[in-house]
Image (cartoon, rainbow, N blue to C red):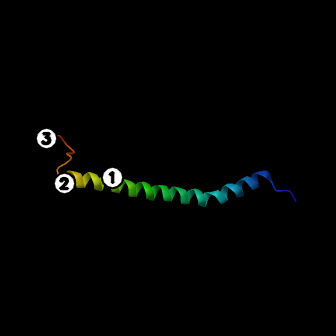
Amino acid sequence: MRTIPWLRHFTTGFAEVPLLAYAIAQWTALSTYALNAIVEIIDVSASNGRWRLSRPK
């Protein structure tokens, strides 16, 4: 019995959806973690007086 080409394409694509969703979730979590770390570094630097986020008037 031959597999219908469009059916095979649909089932293959459908199997890849969970992997894509997992990859997107991992990238989102990693980028959120990195962004929080950068904000924390800027915040600590600003509170120590080494960096100013706005120029004094």
Q: Are marks 2 and 1 in contact (CB under 8 Å)?
A: no
Q: Residues within 10 Å of mark 2 (few under 14, many from 20)?
A: few
7 or 47, which lies in front?
Answer: 47
Does residue 2 appear to the left or right of 30 in the view shown?
Answer: right
Q: Mark 3 points at which residue?
A: 56
Residue that mark 1 sits on: 38
Q: Residues within 10 Å of mark 3 (few under 14, many from 20)?
A: few
Which kind of residue does numbered mark 3 sit on? Pro
| 2 or 1: tag closer to the N-terminus | 1
Asked whether, in this view, residue 39 is left or right of residue 22, the answer is: left
Residue 49 position (above or below residue 25): above
Question: Looking at the picture, does residue 53 appear above or below residue 29?
Answer: above
Amino acid, disc 2: Ser
Instruction: Tell me which label, 3 or 2, sits earlier in the chain.
Output: 2
Q: Is residue 45 above or below residue 18?
A: above
Residue 9 in picture, x, y percent from top left? 73, 53
The CA distance from mark 3 to mark 2 is 15 Å
SS class, disc 3: loop
Rendered image quadrant of residue 12 = bottom right
Instruction: State which quadrant residue 7 falls in.
Output: bottom right
Q: Position of residue 15 (x, y in %)?
A: 66, 60
Number of numbered discs visible in the structure rendering: 3
* Alpha carbon distance from label 1 to label 3: 23 Å
Say which residue appears at 60% left-offset and 59% top-offset: 19
Q: Quadrant of the N terminus?
A: bottom right
Give the residue at x 55% y 58%.
21
Q: Would you name the residue on which mark 2 appears?
A: 47
